[in-house]
Image (spheres, helix red, strand yellow):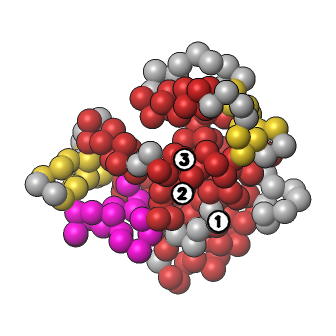
Amino acid sequence: MIALDEEEGELHGSIVRTLESVLAGAVLIDLVLHERIKLLDDRVIVTDQSPIEDDILDKTLFAILDTGRPRKLKYWINTIIYEKVTNEVTHYLVKKEVLIRKKKRLRLAILEGNGSIKSKLENRLRGVVLGDQEPELREKVLLAFLYYTDLLKLVFPHKERKIVRKRVKKWIGDGKEGNNLGTPLDEIVAAASK
C-alpha cells in the first residue's frame, strides 16, 4: 500500500523490483512468525507443516516442503519473486477490499472516518518514529525494510528523514551485531533488501 502511487493508480515504477524482494522477504518473515519455518546455516527449514489458512503463506510453505531438501534463503526470495508475489498480494488486497481495481488502475478503499488503510499505516509509522509510541515487532520489520531499501521517502518527507533514519537505525540495529529484530528476521530483512 505504501508503494502505491495514488495519482497514477499503480505501483511507483522505480521501486517495483525492490518491492518484489521486500514482499518475498515479508512472506518468509510471516512464516517465521507463524513458527512454520526457521533458518539454519542460511537454509530454510520447515518446523511445522500445518497450513496457516492464508493462500500466499500456505503456497510458499508447501513449495518449501516439496523441494525435498533445505535450500538457501536467497533461493527462496528469488523463487517467491519469480512466482509473482506482487501480483498475488495485489489480488489479495483487492479481494479484501483494501484496494479497488477500476479498469487498469488501483485505488485505495476509503474506510469509515474518510481515511485509507495506507494513511492510517503512515500515521501509525509517523507516530512510532516521531512520537513516543512503542513500535510493535511487525512495525519494526516494516521500518527495517524501508530503511535498508532506502524507501523511507515513501512515508517521511525529506526534512524529517535524517532524524527518522537515526531513530529507525537505533531500533533495528546497524546490520551487524546487536540487531534488535531477532536473528532469523534480521537475516531475512538483510537478504531481501540487497
Q: Rate crowding at label 2 as few (under 14), some (14 to 19) or many (20 or more) other CA atoms within 10 Å.
A: many
Residue drawn at x 55%, y 31% as measured from the top left: 63
Determine the CA span between mark 1 and mark 2. 8 Å
Q: Residue furthest right?
A: 177
Left or right? Give the position of 127 relative to 73: left
Label 3 belongs to which residue?
A: 79
Q: Which residues are magenta?
A: 1-16
In the image, residue 104 above or below residue 90 = below
Q: Which mark is residue 21?
A: 2
The reply to whether the magenta stretch includes residue 170 is no
Whether residue 15 can be seen here: yes
Q: Rate crowding at label 3 as few (under 14), some (14 to 19) or many (20 or more) other CA atoms within 10 Å.
A: some
Q: Secondary structure at mark 3?
A: helix
Q: Residue furthest front?
A: 68
Q: Nearer the viewer, mark 2 or mark 3?
A: 3
Q: Secondary structure at mark 2?
A: helix
Q: Position of residue 118 (x, y in %)?
A: 37, 54
Residue drawn at x 11%, y 54% as measured from the top left: 103
Q: Position of residue 57 (x, y in %)?
A: 51, 32
Label 1 belongs to which residue?
A: 194
Q: Secondary structure at mark 1?
A: loop
Q: Position of residue 138 (x, y in %)?
A: 60, 44
Q: Position of residue 42 (x, y in %)?
A: 78, 46
Q: Amino acid at mark 3?
A: Thr
